[in-house]
Structure formats: C-alpha cells, structure tokens
Image (tube, rainbow, N blue to C red):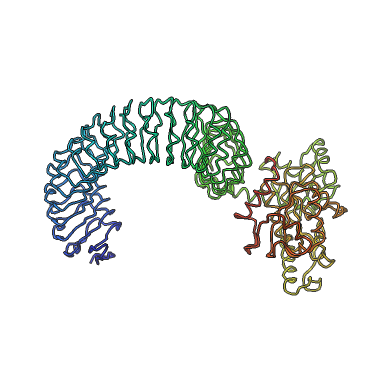
Amino acid sequence: MAAGLNLQPQTVNGLLTLDLSNQGLTSIPEEVFDITDLEFLDVSNNKLTSIPEAIGRLQNLSRLDADGNMMTSLPQAISSLQGLKQLYVHSNNLSELPDGLEDLQNLEWLWVKDNKLKKLPTKIFSCLNLVNFDASNNNLSTFPPGVEKLQKLRELYIYGNQLTEVPSGVCSLPNLEKLSVYNNNLSTFPPGVEKLQKLRELYIYGNQLTEVPSGVCSLPNLEKLSVYNNNLSTFPPGVEKLQKLRELYIHDNQLTEVPSGVCSLPNLEKLSVYNNNLSTFPPGVEKLQKLRELYIHHNQLTEVPSGVCSLPNLEVLSVGNNPIRCLPDEVTRLTRMKTLSVPSCQFDEFPRQVLQLKTLEMLYAGQNGGRKFDMVPDEVGNLQHLWFLALENNLLRTLPSTMSHLHNLRQVQLWNNKFDTFPEVLCELPAMEKLDIKNNNITRIPTALHRADKLRDLDVSGNPLTYPPQDVCKQGTGAIMAFLKQEAEKDERILSAFNRLSVRMSQTQWKPLARSLGLSNRAMDAIKVSAPDDVPDQVYQTLVQWREKEGEAATLSALEQHLRDLDFQQLADQLFRAPREAEKETEDVKSREEHIKVTGRPQKQDDGVKKTQPEGAVAVTKGDSSDSRTSALTARVQPMVRSEVTGGHNAVFLSYQWDHQDKVLLLHDRLQERGYSCWMDIKQMGGGDSLYEMMDKGIRGAKVVVSCVTPPYAESKNCRDEVALARNLNTPIIPVMLEKTTWPPPGPMSIPLAQLLYINMAKGQDEDPWKGALFEELVRMIDSFVKRPKAK
C-alpha cells in the first residue's frame, strides 16, 4: 500500500468509490489498478503528468475524475473502458485527445475544457449518448462535422476558443437546453435557431455579431439571453414573445433604443442595457414587477425612466455616466434597494434622495467626468446597512461626523479628493477592512486609526505624508497600523502624565512652567480667560499647547527637566511615580467595594486598608454617602482624558451613584475619546466649590444626561435631584442600567424613568461594558442630541 494513503474504496451514491483528490500525488499508486470492482476513481487536483495504461484494467469504471492536474496526454487504454459514463479531464495541459473515444458508447459527460486542444477527434460525435459536452477555453478554430448526431445532448459549451462559425448541426439538436459560444470570433450565426424549442439559456456575447438571429425570439422556453459586447445596432422584433425570459444582457453594443417589447416581459429579473447609445427608454418599465437589477449607465439618458420608481423588487440600479441632472424624488419608494450606482452624472449637488434608502448596502458616487461633490450630507449616517462606499474623484475636504454610525462599512474609496487632513471619523468605523485614500494632500495619519483593527488594506500612496515616516508606509498596511498603535500608547502615557500633573500644580507654579515651556504672555492670558478659576485646566492647556508646538521633542523626559530646572522637584518625582500611586489607589477602592459586598458595611480605617490622600486629590460626596463612604471613596488621581473643547458647557452630564464609580470613570473616558465633552463630579469639582452648585452648573450646561442606574442610584436623594432638575430643564435623559434591577426601578424614580427608553448594560459581567453593540447604541442616542465638535 502507498504510504500515507487510504486505498480502501467506499460506497458513495451507490458507486464503489476511491477518492485520492488533493493529495499532491505525482503518480497513481499501482495498487489502485488491482481494485477491479472500482466504479468511481477521483484523482483530481494533484500533480499527475500522466495516467498509466493500467487504467484499462478497471473495466467496471463508470466515472473518472482527473481534472486539475498537469497531464499533457491521455492513455489509449481509456477508450477500452466500455462502462465509462463520465470523464472529466479539464484543467490540464492536454494538446490532443486519443483516438478511439468514439468507442465509449455509454459516455454521457465529457469535459475537456481549459486545456490546449487545437482540434477534436473526428469521430468524437459518435458517442451518441452524450448529454453534456464542454470543450471551452481551448485553441479550437474548427469543429468536426457530425454534432447533429448527438440527439440526446442537453448542454454544449464551446466558448473561449477561436471559432469563426458555430457548427450548423447545432440547430438540429432537439433536446439542447444550454448553448454557450461566447468569446469566439463569430460574425454570423447559423439559421434554424428557432428549432431549439427546449433551449433555456443562450450565451453568444463577446463576438463580432451585427445582428441577433431572428429565430431567437421564437424560443418559448428561453430564460437567459446574453448578446452583449457585439456590434449590434438593432434587435429583432418579437422579444415580447419570450415570456419566460428572466435575464437579458444587451449592453456594450451600438443600440439606440431598447426593444419596446422588453417592457412586456413579466418574468424579467435582470436587464442590462448599459454602454449603448440610448437617449430614451421605452414606456411601460413599471410593468416589470419582478425586476431586481437594472443597468442603464453609460448612455445618453437625461433622466431616470419614471417607471423605475414603481418597481417594488428592485435591488440594484446603475444610472451613472449619463447626463442626468437629478434623481426623481420617488426613488425613495425603492424600499428594497441594496446597490445604487450614480457616478459621473450631472447632479447639481449630492443626491439627498439616496440617503433615505435605508436598505442600501453599496453606494457608488465617485466622479470621472461628471459634476464633482464638495460635501456629503449628514444624512449619510442613516445608511446603517452600508458596507461599500465609493466617493473618489470628488472635491471632498471633510466627511460628516455621522459616518461614525456606519458600523457595517467595510470598504471606502476616497482617492483623488481634496483632503488636507485625514478624516477622523474613519477611525470610528469598527468594520472597515479596506480604505483607499490615495492622491490627496494628507500629511499625517492620526494614531486613532489603529482602533480600526479590522483594516487590512490601506492605500495612502500619492499623499505628502510625513507621519508615519515614509519607511514605515513603504512596508504596507500592517506596518502602518502597528506604528499607529505604538504611537497611540505613547500618546496615552503622555496625556495621562499631563492629567496627573495638572491636578497637582498650584496657581503659583503654573505661570513659571508656562514661561519655561515657551508660551507667550498672550497665550497665557488666553488660557486664563478660557479657564479663569480652573488651575488644572490651565495647566493642561499649557501642556497641550507645548506639545503641539514642540511635536516629537515634547517628551516626558523633557518635561521632567523643565520641572527640575524650576526647582519643582516633588512634581518632577510625581510625574513618573503617579501611575504606581494610581494603581495602588485603584486596588484600595476595589478592596473597599469588595468589603462592602461581603460584610454589608463600609470598611473602616483599621480594617487593614491604609487611607491615601495624594496631593491635589478631590473628595467625592456622591449619592448620599455617609462619612465613612466619603473617606472610603477619596478620589483617585485618575488620568483625565479632557475634551479639547474649552468652552463653558459640557455636552454630556454623567449622573451616577458612588458604587459604580470605576465604570462611570471609564464611560467618561470612552465618550471623551469619541469627541464628546463630559461633566462628572470627580472630574470637574475644584477646591472650595460647592457640590450642589457644580451639579447645577453641569446639568444646566448639558445637552443630554446619562443616568447610570443601579438599585442604590434609584434611592439616592442627590441622584433623584439630578433627574428632577434635568426634567424641569427639559434636558433629554438616557437611562443606562448598570446593575440588574426591575424596570422601572421601584421608588421615587419609577415615574420619571418609566417614560424613557433604557439601555440594559447589566446583561454581561464584563469589567469594561463600554464596548460592543450596546455601547454603540448609547453613542447613537447621545449623538441624536449632541453635535460633536470637530477634532483638532
């Protein structure tokens, strides 16, 4: 037995079968030819260069699969296999077939396509039982006589050769159902095609025909007719008689009109007439109620045929490269539309009707000769099912922030536009796999793009990129994404350090540092005006401006040196020590929370946890906390991801009770990363400010309140007051259930919360609930109330 091969045949579909396909074989093991009862031998997709003459010993063989190998010839012994019904030797290197195949009188299926055959054996058509013959994609220039003898033939494939004529006997095959002669050199078609009364599919495209055989319109069972890419200027009358026709392809010809009878074909599902010379469309297209795909692009049409908007099953519509000025408003009635192609038309503006097609999956709106778009409307965010978007060859400089809602978008084409900066919204597309933004004016790719972790094909060629460096870009997408991720982690460390430092510096230390970092008096005055009573914010703005000015030179080591030069030794020491302190404080908080869960009471100072109060920390008195709770929840010096918006209002107010402070802190940072400015007491409270005054200021300045609901939250007086104030001010409230509870939660909050839609984040026990579909739903709800600022 051959090593590693199972040469034990099995009964499959009633045939004793030996399957040796896809084994990398260079020869057939000799033992195979001793299995004389074998009926089906499969040696396809190997590396065979020949089949031995010993194949003649398998006299019971009914089927032989030897396709997908490297054979240059077949053994003569094959002609002795009198029981052979199916012979598949396609996709080899055969230059000829052996004589004697006509002896295979039981042969029904013969596939010799995808070889190098220049001729067929002269007696091949003496195999009178053939029902399926495929000799396509060879080098045949002639065909042997006698094909009319194959009275049982149902399918004939001779496409992809060099034939100048179809054998006339083909039209004498009464059982023929499929005829494929495309991609040859045919200039005529033999008469008598109307005799093929069982013909269901006819493919004669890719030839040099100047007319369609008139008999074609007399084929009552024809379902598919493809005559595209010929030299047709007219179409024979009578097409309306093809009542079973489902697919008609007459594109890439020289037609000046669509045959009027086409609109009388009740079963038509696909109609392709693009790339002709059409200036009008026949009336009655609305009668094509089963039509699913319509291709009319690359013509001279000035409008979309009005009846198109009355096609209830239309899924694909291609109208590009026509002098069309606008789409009809009724196009919004196409409620099953999946693919719309409108490139290179003469639209005055982006066709907004498109953006109401909620089922759309693919949108082609690139320009190559038509009027170019300089903006995309915000409503593009409504296309929740969109996975492909083409906007190339336009004048776009920005993209709407609402594109962040397109969570299914996988491929984006933006090449040849006017982008000076990389559109930040692209960084928020979680499903994006391919992005082509070549040939723009982009100098930097933002580090946030690394969050698009499914991106595998990024083309940024033809841009004057300075970041990432050219040596990285030349290595391709993988190297770019790895670089951006590494840089993002570095950015996060630096910004975290800026946050830590900003809550530790005093008013008297701020100005000396600002001067040392090179800020002018005017810049310091502007910072003072923007945050008059907020020293941490003043410090943070100072550090950010320094980093923007110095770029790569603004390292933590450089900052440390500035602090030491100013003799701020303690701050310099804390710059790198603070992360360890923050980790320790996090552990303390988690320990105290665990203690409460187990014992039902707060942990005292003598319970083994040391209370820490780092310089600059803020005490939190949230949710009716008792003194012991207050001391237990002394705020950690948390790395604050501050919004770059420095105005007086925060867009999102986070209402929560102290028991889920860690998760709410994480929510704050996630929303800040998405571009929302947020109010959270642990973030905004300053020394000497009243908690209630700050809560009032935060809610009055908010566009939306996110209520993080837990059972203690529903009982908290402070939290009830926040909800009540938001209701009185008509500020929208989005409840988020953080811990399993009945809905609405019992107690005083049941009535106000019962009226609101809530998001149930309590289903999972993940430490980080702010990811996945539910978090994206929260972002979408917030976005409906808040317009995010443009990223700097």
Instruction: For the N terminus, give its image quadrant.
Output: bottom left
The relative height of residue 725 versus residue 163 in the rendered view (above or below) is below
Q: Quadrant of residue 440?
A: top right
Left or right of 499 in this view: 771: left
* Residue positioned 73% across, 63% down in the render: 745
Instruction: For the C terminus, give its image quadrant.
Output: top right
Identify which residue, 209 or 606, lies in the foreground.
209
The relative height of residue 599 versus residue 29 in the rendered view (above or below) is below
Q: Position of residue 443 (x, y in %)?
A: 60, 36
The relative height of residue 549 versus residue 752 in the rendered view (above or below) is above
Q: Position of residue 97 (x, y in %)?
A: 16, 46
Q: Position of residue 346 (x, y in %)?
A: 52, 26
Identify which residue, 304 or 619, lies in the foreground.
304
Identify which residue, 8 or 575, lies in the foreground.
8
Q: Position of residue 533 (x, y in %)?
A: 85, 46
Q: Quadrant of residue 244?
A: top left
Left or right of 493 in this view: 413: left
Identify which residue, 340 or 452, lies in the foreground.
340
Tally of numbered tags: 0
